[in-house]
Image: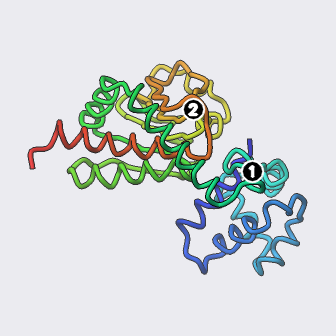
Amino acid sequence: MSNIRIQLLNIINRDSSDSMNFIIAKYILENLERMKVISTKELAEECNVSKSSISRFCRKIGYEDFMDLQISIATYNSYVNDQFPRLEENSSKDFIQSYFECTKAIIDYLEKHLDIEVLEQLVQDIHDYQRVVLMGHVQSSFPAFSLQHYLTILHKFVYSTQDLNEQKGMLEKFDERNLIIIFSAGGKFLERVLERTSVMNRRHIPKIYIITANKTTHFPFVYKYIELGETFNYASSVGLEIYSKLISLMYRKKYTDF
């Protein structure tokens, strides 16, 4: 599974727009679907940077060398039909109505299946742990950052990251004193971040919650999976956003007096 788009978006969102890394990331993103084979020299010329800048860029986003980057570009798949339904035969009114129906179905599922005890346990852990880290990628990072924002208002500091390399390092090194909450619409976060899930087969690991909109593979080192739907579709991220808000509301109810 290629993570190239996530890694490039992380550069776009964090680096200055006139930096070399931003320029390189922007070019690759704009040409990702058609740029399956390109040399270091060609990429450097297109971005008006040196070949050494390309090498540094590769290391910056977690690749050993340019060949590693090339492999990731060549194997990239946008899975566009999983993100957006085919709309050619639908009128604008029809596909908008379809989206609303999918969203309503997600809300109905949450209302019927929400485990309040699990929600309360998660909120208690957020309150009790000194170090809490929220993780997500692309659309799943929005509920993570939103939760960070609201918890800060409620005087609870938590850290949020969508940097794949930083996430990998935390999962591999953090111990039981740490709480990690992962938002993953499709449920494939761990397979995407960890080269080997066996790295988690150690004695002292962080307490991990995974909040997903999909039924997914359960790893034994994950403390709790919170599955907010049966299958992933283009409206699934709505469920994550609602659950994120429920966490902050429950925290407000239980742990603030202002």
Horizontally, is 95 left or right of 241 in the view? right
Res 257 seen here: yes
Horizontally, is 14 left or right of 30 in the view? left
Q: Secondary structure at mark 2?
A: loop
x and y percentages locating residue 221 in the rendered image: 51, 22
Residue found at x 28% / y 29%: 120
Task: Rate crowding at label 1 as few (under 14), some (14 to 19) or many (20 or more) other CA atoms within 10 Å.
Answer: few
In terms of depth relative to the viewer, which is nearer, 176 or 3?
3
Horizontally, is 243 left or right of 70 in the view? left
Q: Which residue is mark 2?
A: 214
Does residue 141 sit above or below 127 in this rendering?
Answer: below
x and y percentages locating residue 226 in the rendered image: 45, 28
**Label total for image:** 2
x and y percentages locating residue 235 in the rendered image: 56, 46
**Which color scheme is applied?**
rainbow
Quarter of image, res 126: top left
